[in-house]
Image (spheres, rainbow, N blue to C red):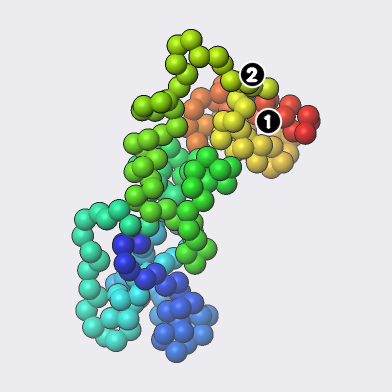
């Protein structure tokens, strides 16, 4: 999480602040630095740090604490969003890519979402609350081409097909279930729908 109002920097920025090349920074200084300055996004592939903490460390001062508590303008990683919404980080990314969720903002290569929009999504998910669903007596909308049409998981299944490389559908489905939740049987159906949908494109 990047706390509201704080500036995040990556290791390239830190090396520049220290007057070193990135390779020299990583080889001789990064290890000790990481012991004293926490990574803002420990569940992300990209290491990001709070600029004020970095500057204090480089100046030989004690590293100040980050603000406590939660703020609506905090920026959350995919893993943190997943914890709030009760889904996997991979599903968060797939939802964002397929348009079922906000694309968020990108900070030094990491996609992030404000706590405000995540809580709004949690508390007002599509189909929930006032106006959600079809009222009795209302005509149904257009019939779906298949049961999973519009399901964001279908995007994940389609992305998995090229990398499956002939692997048995059951094994691919089990891997997707372990990564994203739902049952392997559901993922088998999604993979079937994704295959048929691709062949009809």
- Residue 83 screen position, x and y as percent: 36, 42
Contact, CB < 8 Å: mark 1 with mark 2? no
**Which residue is drawn at the image coordinates 67% and 26% (left, top)?**
193
Residue 185 in the image: above or below residue 124: above
Residue 88 shows in the view: yes
Q: Which residue is mark 1?
A: 194
Nearer-the-camera pick, 3 or 62: 3
Q: Which residue is disc 2 drawn over? A: 143
Q: Residue 125: x percent and y percent?
A: 41, 34
In this rendering, would 52 be left or right of 143? left
Badge 2 element: loop
Side of 160 where 62 appears, left or right: left
Left or right for 1, reference 141: left
At which x and y percent is residue 163?
A: 69, 42
Quadrant (top left, top right, bottom left, bottom right) of the N terminus: bottom left
User: Between 144 and 28, which is closer to the camera in this rendering?
Assistant: 144
Quadrant assignment for the C terminus: top right
Mark identifier at residue 119: none
> Does residue 183 appear to the left or right of 70 in the view shown?
right
- Residue 190 makes an appearance in the image: no
| 40 in relation to 132, above or below | below
Task: Looking at this view, name the residue that lies furthest to the top.
Answer: 137
Task: Quote the CA–CA distance across marks 1 and 2.
Answer: 18 Å
For the residues carrying marks 1 and 2, which lies nearer the camera in this image? 2
């Amino acid at each position: 999480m990047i706390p509201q109002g704080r500036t995040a920097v990556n290791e390239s920025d830190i090396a520049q602040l220290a007057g070193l090349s990135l390779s020299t920074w990583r080889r001789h200084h990064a290890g000790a630095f990481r012991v004293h300055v926490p990574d803002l996004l420990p569940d992300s592939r990209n290491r990001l740090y709070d600029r004020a903490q970095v500057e204090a460390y480089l100046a030989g001062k004690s590293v100040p604490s980050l603000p406590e508590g939660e703020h609506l303008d905090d920026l959350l990683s995919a893993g943190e969003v997943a914890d709030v919404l009760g889904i996997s980080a991979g599903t968060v990314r797939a939802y964002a890519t397929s348009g079922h969720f906000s694309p968020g903002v990108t900070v030094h290569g990491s996609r992030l979402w404000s706590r405000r929009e995540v809580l709004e999504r949690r508390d007002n998910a599509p189909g929930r609350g006032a106006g959600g669903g079809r009222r009795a007596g209302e005509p149904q909308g257009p019939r779906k081409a298949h049961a999973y049409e519009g399901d964001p998981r279908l995007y994940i299944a389609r992305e998995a097909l090229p990398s499956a490389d002939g692997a048995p559908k059951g094994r691919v489905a089990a891997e997707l279930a372990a990564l994203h939740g739902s049952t392997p049987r559901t993922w088998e159906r999604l993979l079937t729908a994704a295959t048929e949908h691709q062949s009809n494109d």
